[in-house]
Amino acid sequence: MAGSESPLTPRRRLRNELWVSRQAGWWRAYADVAPGRLLELIDYETAASAISQFELFAVPGILQTEQYARAVLRASYDAGSLVERLVALRGRRRDLLVGEGAPAFSFVLDESVIRRPVGSPATMADQLRHLITLADRPNVTIRVVPFTVGLHPGSRGSVKVIEFDDDPDRSVAFLEGLPGDVLTEDPADVSTYSALFRSIAQVALEPGDSAGLLRAAAGELT
């Protein structure tokens, strides 16, 4: 019919749903300090059924303790007030791990993440123990790629894949890098990064062995 709107594609529907959620989302209160790409990422995370993430450099933000997050942010920002606002944002974001209908999280960390000093030894030890505690949650898996593996498919950088139960074809991938963060919905790109995550996970320790490595690393700091 002339003048009628064409049906929304699944991706256009998702964008509309996310736009609506952003208007009421708690993260909107941080729009003055948080990059727009991060707010968009949180939009996707709150609607996700599964999130798979590999980190090469630091503990993922959603897994960070307050003191660890403060140390990470102080390395990038001079203004104390800005750092504290961003620390608060990460604190709110952690609620996604334990909320009703929380996504299934699968994290793979390079061993450099748990060996690189961030903040004081006590801050680092507390962070590692926090990871062990989180890994006991039924919806959270944390695995570590040990140094003994050598170079591996994840050596090029960090990657996150976000999936949705109601429409698997709507999955998105997020990549961090110096040129700028990239959030892609392209099915071919998402498929490539999903395969990359799986290949990294294949060389990681099993969850129990990963917890043992985390526990040993924390013990070396105390």
Image (tube, helix red, strand yellow):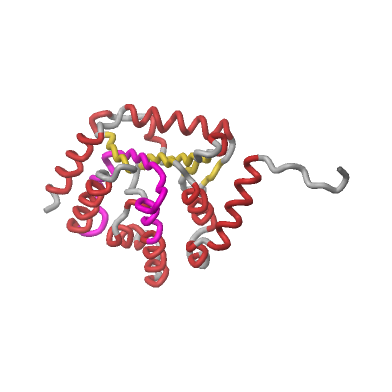
Residue 181, how many percent across, how many down?
Answer: 50, 48
Residue 90, how many percent across, how many down?
Answer: 38, 59
Q: Quadrant of residue 206?
A: top left
For this rendering, which residue is in front, 17 or 210? 17
Residue 60, how many percent across, how many down?
Answer: 36, 49
Residue at 56% from the left image edge and 34% from the top image edge: 169
Region in magenta:
92-120
Residue at 16% from the left image edge and 44% from the top image edge: 215
> Does the rendering let one see residue 61?
no
Outermost residue toward the bottom in this view? 81
Q: Is residue 88 above or below residue 133?
A: below
Residue 97 counted in the magenta span: yes
Residue at 36% from the left image edge and 42% from the top image edge: 55
Residue at 20% from the left image edge and 50% from the top image edge: 129
| Quadrant into which the N terminus falls | top right
For this rendering, which residue is in front, 53 or 166? 166
Residue 95, how many percent across, how many down?
Answer: 37, 56
On screen, residue 181 versus residue 84, left or right, reads: right
On screen, residue 78 versus residue 42, left or right, reads: left
The tally of labels here is: 0
Q: Is residue 26 above or below residue 6?
A: below
Q: Quadrant of residue 160?
A: top left
> Does the rendering let one see residue 206?
yes
Residue 94 counted in the magenta span: yes
Q: Is residue 109 above or below residue 218?
A: above
On screen, residue 66 versus residue 166, left or right, reads: left
